Image (cartoon, rainbow, N blue to C red):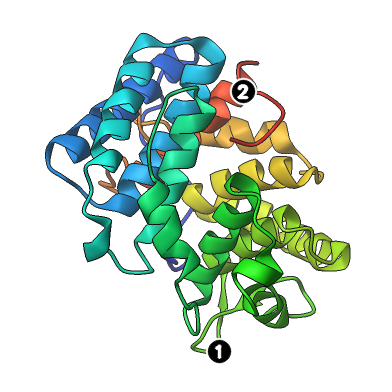
Amino acid sequence: MRGYWIGLLLAGLLPVAAAADDALPRARAWVQQALGAELRGGGDLNRIASLAFPLATDARATGDAGSRALLGALARHLAGLDVAGLDCAQLPDVVLAGGFVRDAGEAVDVAAAERRLANCQFGSALFDTANALVFACRYAGWDPVARLPGSLSRLVAAQRADGAFVAENGRASYYLSSHAVLAVHWCGGDPAVVARGAAYLRAGLVPFRDRGFNDGLAESLIFLRWLGAEAPDRESHLAALRARIRPDGGLCFVEQPGCSSHWHATSLLLELLLERGGFAPGAAP
């Protein structure tokens, strides 16, 4: 699930909100249509994994037939991939997508990708390292020290005192930080590292809401839930996101005039709507 930092934008430039009572089905339809288009076009693996994530929650929790059908199509797509032609940056997306499909109760074969991932050397790309550890610890049940030696310790070493994680360019990165703290949490790492990471996510909630950084706000709310960490004023943050739902049922990555619904932000929106509607289970998908 990759993201890109967007600079500060003026708050308050919001599109017309969708009706509250149909927000979930409209967001679901947007994500389903987007994933269907990606599968028909042999699309980007990261985008496919991101779109599959809330549909797996939807299929498991509500039994929606459309979401189930798409996850079945995704299982066939993953099984037909030539994994020998994929690099170590793409393999985590394959196995994460496979994990989402399995969590929804659909059979999927990504064993070849899992074997290749186990042989990857994550020497410099910290974001890819974090995603590989999420798979290793959440889905494969691997011992990260034995199977991905040095990866967890290298990730932990990149954390600053304020809980942010610093990328290869020497700058703190929100998306690296959000994925890294999740990896440390699921890999049984130092609770102090996780607590600092959760504090960093919490500190961004109000600024993200006020700047209209919808994607970061939604991701932080979801990840804090998975970490079992508090998210102050959660309902007000959710209300702000609902007010920004576009007429097509999606959500802009960042609010600005003329913005369009974005695949990553809308995927996160659907997950939050499922949770808010009482559908999403307590355990993370």
Placement of 90 over or under 48, stated as above or below:
below
Q: Which residue is at 76% across, 39% downward?
A: 233
Towards the viewer: 217 or 173? 173
Considering every residue shown, the one lying at the far bottom of the view is 170
For label 1, count other residues whose C-alpha is less than 10 Å away and answer few (under 14), some (14-19) or many (20+).
few
Tell me if 273 is positioned left or right of 226 in this view.
Answer: left
Residue in front for this viewpoint, 215 or 51: 51
Residue that appears at 27% across and 43% down:
260
Residue 1 percent coordinates (x, y): 44, 52
Element on which disc 1 rests? loop
Structural distance between the alpha carbons of marks 2 and 1: 37 Å
Identify the residue at image location x=51%, y=86%. 168
x and y percent of residue 30 in the render?
A: 30, 27
| Amino acid at dot 1 | Gly
- The answer to whether residue 53 is above or below residue 273 is below
Q: Quadrant of residue 86?
A: bottom left
Q: Nearer the viewer, mark 2 or mark 1?
A: 2
Q: Which mark, residue 170? A: 1
Quadrant in the picture for residue 221 = top right
Q: Nearer the viewer, residue 277 or 234?
A: 277
Tell me the number on the disc at residue 280: 2
Secondary-structure class at tag 2 = loop
Kind of residue indicated by mark 2: Ala
How dense is the environment of label 2, judged by Cα within 10 Å: few (below 14), some, or many (20 and up)?
A: many
For the C terminus, the quadrant is: top right
Give yes or no for contact between labels 2 and 1 (Cβ–Cβ under 8 Å): no
Indicate the quadrant where residue 203 lies: bottom right
